[in-house]
Image (cartoon, rainbow, N blue to C red):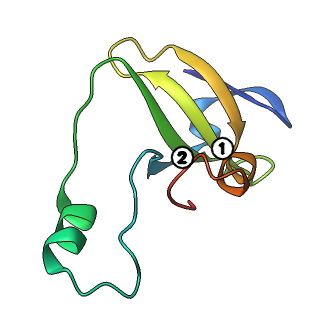
């Protein structure tokens, strides 16, 4: 799989580290709702189709990226810096 880093250009997936689902919402840190925290930590979906993920370009520029990838075909439709999405409020968590 080739990932087109916005800073370094096209690179092999071996340079990157998967950091998790970019669509999950973290419960309020002050919350003591055990059910919400258990769901956040342990519950995972296995979506088919397009999905947003956090990746770290560990073997390159060390930037956190948000990659939209088709889970069935592994075709990547978009790559962007995570800092841009987080600062604009489009994503729930920081990587």
Q: Residues within 10 Å of mark 1 (few under 14, many from 20)?
A: many
Residue 52 x/y as whole percent: 48, 35
Residue closest to the eye, 83 or 27: 27
Residue closest to the eye, 60 or 20: 20
**Looking at the image, which residue is at 35% across and 17% down?**
49
Tell me which numbered mark, 1 or 2, is placed earlier along the sequence. Answer: 2
Which numbered circle lies on residue 8?
Answer: none
Q: Quadrant of the C terminus?
A: bottom right
Residue 25 x/y as whole percent: 40, 57
Residue 15 x/y as whole percent: 64, 41
Q: Tell me the SS state at disc 1.
A: strand
Which residue position is annotated with label 2? 54
Residue 36 x/y as whole percent: 21, 69
- Proximity of marks 1 and 2: CB atoms separated by less than 8 Å: yes
Q: Quadrant of the N terminus?
A: top right
Q: Find the distance from the CA under tag 1 to the CA under tag 2.
A: 6 Å
Instruction: Tell me: residue 15, above or below residue 9.
Output: below
**Looking at the image, which residue is at 41% across and 82% down?**
29
Q: Is residue 38 left or right of residue 40?
A: left
Q: Is residue 12 left or right of residue 62?
A: left
Which residue position is annotated with label 1? 65
**Looking at the image, which residue is at 20% across and 80% down?**
33
Instruction: Tell me: residue 37, above or below residue 12.
Output: below
Q: Tell me the SS state at disc 2.
A: strand
Q: Residues within 10 Å of mark 2 (few under 14, many from 20)?
A: many
Residue 77, by quadrant, is top right
């Amino acid at each position: 799989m080739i990932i087109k880093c916005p800073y370094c250009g096209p690179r092999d997936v071996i340079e990157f580290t998967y950091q998790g689902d970019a669509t999950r919402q973290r419960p309020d840190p002050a919350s003591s709702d055990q059910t919400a925290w258990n769901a956040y930590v342990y519950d995972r979906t296995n979506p088919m189709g397009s999905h947003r993920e956090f990746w770290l370009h560990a073997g390159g520029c060390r930037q956190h990226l948000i990659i939209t990838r088709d889970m069935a075909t592994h075709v990547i439709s978009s790559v962007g810096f995570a800092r841009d999405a987080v600062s604009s409020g489009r994503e729930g968590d920081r990587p």
